Image: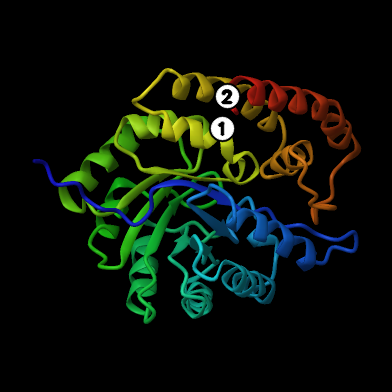
């Protein structure tokens, strides 16, 4: 009988969106209510201070406040992954200290943003974080080349050598490279989880041996993502739900990232308040126009897939 490798991260993980008050401060009371509901949901875990949570628009103190709040509310109910991406390893290590205190299940870390770095510099960044990881929090590498330097196959191979490397989230759509990474994982570190950050790629990720996803749609609309995962390999419902979800994703992609997910949040009944980023009137008008479309698609998805 073939041995089944147990991996740390598998299934549906929702990326928490951060609610703000009209004056731009974080609405901690609203966030607490939303986290309580999410930690009681069918999700396998939550990701806080991720890209869609707009961690880069918040201070170190604000991000660590959210980390502490999530740890207190969760209290071990679900897996908790905390973002530790920073502009350099100094601040990434500071985030790791805060993450280890809440006994998080993982730390999501992309390469440093703003400055362009070489493969050797990116690998040194991760090695430094791994070396200083006294809490031994599993590191989840994060490839998001639209926002930071890309993680190449060479860097990924180096990450597999890190003892506390537990997973890899890929928010890019180069299927050739992703398949090479999955194959390398299978041969070198079969215990490492391979996850997508793109809702449109979930079905394909599962098909090539991936383990699940970290996304904001999973946080806002977990029932549809669960169908894709739970029905994969069992019925046509998985592929059909993935295709139907693409219509919603195409509307989101009309907006700059991550504003489209704030629009979807409103359509899904999540109150997030005013964005810290200035939104021009034409984008506000577009949001008002697509909200009814989003709600119609959600109602249709409910009618087709949710009992």
Label 1 and label 2: CA atoms lie apart by: 7 Å
Q: Earlier in the sequence, mark 1 or mark 2?
A: 1
Q: Which residue is mark 2?
A: 305
- In the displayed structure, 136 sits above or below 10; it is below
Estimate the x, y position of residue 230 in percent, counting from the top left: 42, 34
Q: Quadrant of residue 205?
A: top left
197 is higher (above) or lower (below) than 119: above
Q: Taking the image as drawn, is residue 26 in sight?
A: no
Which of the 4 quarters of the picture holds residue 25? bottom right
Query: What residue sits 33% from the left and 50% below the top?
Result: 193
Q: Which residue does the image show at 62% across and 29% down from the upper left?
A: 249
Q: Position of residue 37 (x, y in %)?
A: 66, 55
Q: Is residue 86 visible?
A: yes
Q: Residue 229: horizontal and vertical position, in percent? A: 43, 35
Q: Which residue is mark 1?
A: 224
Residues at circles 1 and 2 in contact by the CB criterion of under 8 Å? yes
Label 2: element kind: helix
Assign a secondary structure to mark 1: helix
Q: Is residue 305 above or below residue 75?
A: above
């Amino acid at each position: 009988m073939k041995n089944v490798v147990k991996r740390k991260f598998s299934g549906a993980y929702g990326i928490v969106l951060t609610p703000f008050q009209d004056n731009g401060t974080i609405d901690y009371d609203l966030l607490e209510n939303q986290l309580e509901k999410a930690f009681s949901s069918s999700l396998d875990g939550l990701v806080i201070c991720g890209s869609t949570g707009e961690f880069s628009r918040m201070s170190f103190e604000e991000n660590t406040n959210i980390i502490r709040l999530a740890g207190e509310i969760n209290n071990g109910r679900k897996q908790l992954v905390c973002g530790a991406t920073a502009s350099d390893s100094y601040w990434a290590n500071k985030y790791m200290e805060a993450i280890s205190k809440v006994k998080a299940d993982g730390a999501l870390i992309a390469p440093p943003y703003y400055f362009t770095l070489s493969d050797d510099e990116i690998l040194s960044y991760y090695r430094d974080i791994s070396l200083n990881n006294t809490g031994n929090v599993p590191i989840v590498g994060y490839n998001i080349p639209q926002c930071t330097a890309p993680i190449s196959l060479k860097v990924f191979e180096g990450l597999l050598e890190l003892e506390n490397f537990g997973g890899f989230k890929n928010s890019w759509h180069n299927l050739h490279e992703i398949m090479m990474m999955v194959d390398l994982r299978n041969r070198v570190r079969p215990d490492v989880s391979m996850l997508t950050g793109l809702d449109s790629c979930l079905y394909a990720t599962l098909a090539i041996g991936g383990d699940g996803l970290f996304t904001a749609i999973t946080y806002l609309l977990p029932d549809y993502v669960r169908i894709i995962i739970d029905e994969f390999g069992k019925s046509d419902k998985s592929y059909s739900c993935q295709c139907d979800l693409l219509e919603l994703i195409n509307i989101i992609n009309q907006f700059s990232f991550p504003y489209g997910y704030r629009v979807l949040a409103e359509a899904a009944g999540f109150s997030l308040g005013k964005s810290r980023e200035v939104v021009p009137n034409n984008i506000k008008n577009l949001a008002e126009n697509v909200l009814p479309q989003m709600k119609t698609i959600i109602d249709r998805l409910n009618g087709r897939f949710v009992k």
